[in-house]
Amino acid sequence: MSSNCTVLVTGGAGFVGSHACKALSRRGFTPVVYDNLSYGHEDAVRWGPLERGDILDRTRLDEVIATHHPAAIMHFAAFIAVGESVTDPGKYYRNNVAGSLGLMEAARDHGISAFVFSSTAAVYGLPEVVPIPESAPKLPINPYGHSKWMVECMLRDFGEAHGLKSMALRYFNAAGADPDCETGERHDPETHLIPLALDAAAGVGKPLTVFGEDYDTPDGTCIRDYIHVADLAEAHVAALQALLGGADSNAYNLGTGNGFTVRQVIDAVEKVTGRAVPHSIGPRRPGDPAALVADPSAANRDLGWRPRISDLDSIVATAWAWHQKVNG
Ligand SMILES: NC(=O)c1ccc[n+]([C@@H]2O[C@H](COP(=O)([O-])OP(=O)(O)OC[C@H]3O[C@@H](n4cnc5c(N)ncnc54)[C@H](O)[C@@H]3O)[C@@H](O)[C@H]2O)c1
Ligand SMILES: O=c1ccn([C@@H]2O[C@H](COP(=O)(O)OP(=O)(O)O[C@H]3O[C@H](CO)[C@@H](O)[C@H](O)[C@H]3O)[C@@H](O)[C@H]2O)c(=O)[nH]1
């Protein structure tokens, strides 16, 4: 490992980024969070300094990089709401694509050669083969997915032209919370299934609407591959260590390889919380594929990474503990 253990973590005040900071700090790295707090939380920055700034502000980026001299960048900062990306695509292309471009140019200009990027299963669009291998066609069906695939393409080109080495990590459904309850999911607005089901069970939110029960799946509801955010965090550290150890650039799926239906998630929430999840059946949500499940074998093989706490009960139990801490 390089003797310089400082990592610039864009979006480190957010859900996945804050867990990655904890994992980095446990492995001896110093995470310097660079976040404009547009959606993040200042009190989620606990494992290193917070530098407020926008990835679109090149002057501020240069200043922070010159101050901390990071050896690597982990890039989580992005807008993440798929539906909003359809109605306001400019917001997504500016932040996710132009913002990432400025960050990559800053990395190039400051001689930073290791870059770990938050990509997504949304780059695959409506996959024909499930479990999905990394080689599956990249045919995103919304601006959010396009924005992430564009950044992957830019990273490939910066690698060839400038020697910037990168790992693009394509998460499936990030869920759960830190097992020590030090950080967790606090999106606003929240659109993800598990926190909404917990809100409904706790009576702090509306009843859950199940988006469609006429899919070609065993119980008619959509199948997703839920991956614990702490396991995602460990994968980021493994990818970073591989890059710093000389590995080539690559892209990896991060999932368990097991899918669960929306009904199975509701059952798990009812079992873990001991409460009913009030819900009704609504129409399909536009753009939802019937099933998204990762083939995670490449990350297993190359990074030595395996999910450890991504069974559905552990995901829901940690998310529930965090939910109770936040909501009292
Ligand atoms: N949550 C998921 O299920 C999921 C799935 C696949 C991929 N991802 C990707 O993982 C990353 C993190 O997602 P998350 O769920 O933690 O989201 P989040 O909204 O909790 O975190 C994103 C963070 O980035 C910051 N940010 C946004 N734009 C910024 C800018 N211009 N400059 C500086 N900071 C900025 C926000 O303030 C926030 O703290 C994103 O890139 C997302 O696309 C998330
Ligand atoms: O109120 C709700 C919310 C969700 N769902 C369903 O639950 C499943 C999971 O939905 P959600 O939690 O919104 O996640 P996804 O839409 O699968 O998207 C997540 O996972 C993608 C990769 O798989 C990432 O690209 C996205 O950023 C991330 O939000 C889907 O079948 C939804 O139709 C409902 O039935 N009701």
Image: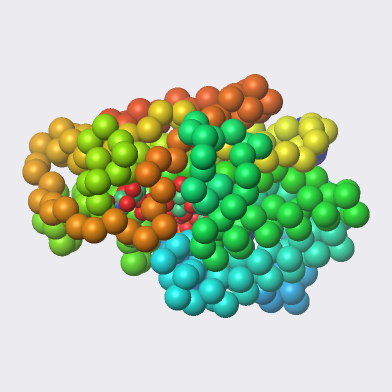
> Is 41 drawn above or below residue 233 in the view shown?
below
Q: How is the image coloured?
A: rainbow
Q: Nearer the viewer, residue 301 or 34?
A: 301
* Residue 76, position as x, y percentages in the image: 58, 55
Left or right placement of residue 244 versus residue 268 in this view: right
Q: Residue furthest right?
A: 161
Q: Nearer the viewer, residue 258 or 44?
A: 258
Residue at 73% x, 32% y: name it: 242
- How many numbered discs sit on the rendered protein? 0
Q: Is residue 164 visible?
A: no
Image quadrant assignment for residue 84 = bottom left
Image quadrant assignment for residue 168 = top right
Residue at 80% x, 45% y: name it: 165
Left or right placement of residue 201 versus residue 28 in this view: left
* Residue 120, position as x, y percentages in the image: 54, 49
> Is 190 drawn above or below residue 163 in the view shown?
below
Residue at 51% x, 43% y: name it: 127
Q: Is residue 298 visible?
A: yes
* Residue 183, position as x, y percentages in the image: 40, 49
* Residue 92, position as x, y percentages in the image: 56, 70
For the C terminus, the quadrant is bottom left
Residue at 54% x, 74% y: name it: 89
Left or right placement of residue 299 versus residue 66 in this view: left
For the N terminus, the quadrant is top right
